[in-house]
Image (cartoon, rainbow, N blue to C red):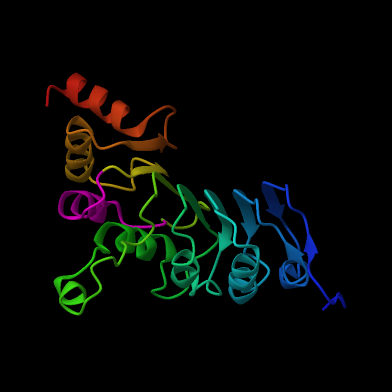
Amino acid sequence: MIGFVNPILHPRLRSLDLLTVYPENFLDVINLPSLEEWSMDMGFGSAVAAMQSFLTRSGCHLRVLNLDRLGYSSKNIESLLEQIPTLERLRLSSMWKYGDGDVPYDILTRIFWAVPSSRNIRRGNPTHEPFLPRLQVVECTTDESFLSFSWDDIPRLYSRGHRRSVTLKAFATHSDMTDETALRLLRLTEEGVDLEIGDLTESGDFLQNFRKRMCVEGV
């Protein structure tokens, strides 16, 4: 670690894009109280502990967080996000899949299902907040070798979950989902759910392209 006694204060810095082999060496020596947008490359190893310490030290009200190249070393992402209730936009970019660890899907599930339970309320904790209560947009991207999540699960999350106002941004090819799943997603958009799914097979919006194909086929 670089031998600074006190962290360097940058009181007006609002945006940080960090790409370094040893991110903890940088995060341990700065204080950014005005930080609002943070892009972080997670591909050089786990820096979650250093990130959490940095957030505690800075006391910033982060609005945008982009986590790129998430891999098997990023299992503590949920605990990191619990520390950022002010977050409005989140990007999760996966680098590879490790066993059953699916960070984007786990986070999506937590977003849609985490609400105060009656047990918490009975125990005198009625102010317990849901996970990322201010979140408006979550974006999931990945390399081309695997999916960030199973599209079959997304209609269930939106239909039975509690965060229908959250916009989901992602990409898909025609082989990524069945027509049945695409139809269920299309119906969700007709109910007001905001799904922005880029079409990697063609171009444009995946669901709009699916709608056009249905019209042509007379479905």
Label total for image: 0
Q: Quadrant of the N terminus?
A: bottom right
Which residue is painted at 49% across and 56% down in the image?
145
At which x and y percent is residue 192? Answer: 22, 33
Is residue 16 shown left or right of residue 200?
Answer: right
Residue 59: name its quadrant.
bottom right
Vertical position of residue 176 compared to residue 99: above or below = above
At which x and y percent is residue 78? Answer: 44, 69
Is residue 203 shown left or right of residue 9?
Answer: left
Residue 210: name its quadrant.
top left
Which contiguous range is marked in magenta? 148-164
Nearer to us in this view, 58 or 141: 58
Q: Is residue 211 magenta?
A: no
At which x and y percent is residue 7? Answer: 78, 69
Q: Quadrant of the C terminus?
A: top left
Q: Is residue 150 magenta?
A: yes
Which residue is painted at 33% across and 58% down in the image?
111
Vertical position of residue 112 compared to residue 214: above or below = below
At which x and y percent is residue 48? Answer: 58, 72
Toward the front, the furthest residue is 124
Vertical position of residue 63 compared to residue 196: above or below = below
Is residue 197 shown left or right of residue 119?
Answer: right
Toward the left, the furthest residue is 219
Which residue is painted at 28% across and 65% down in the image?
127
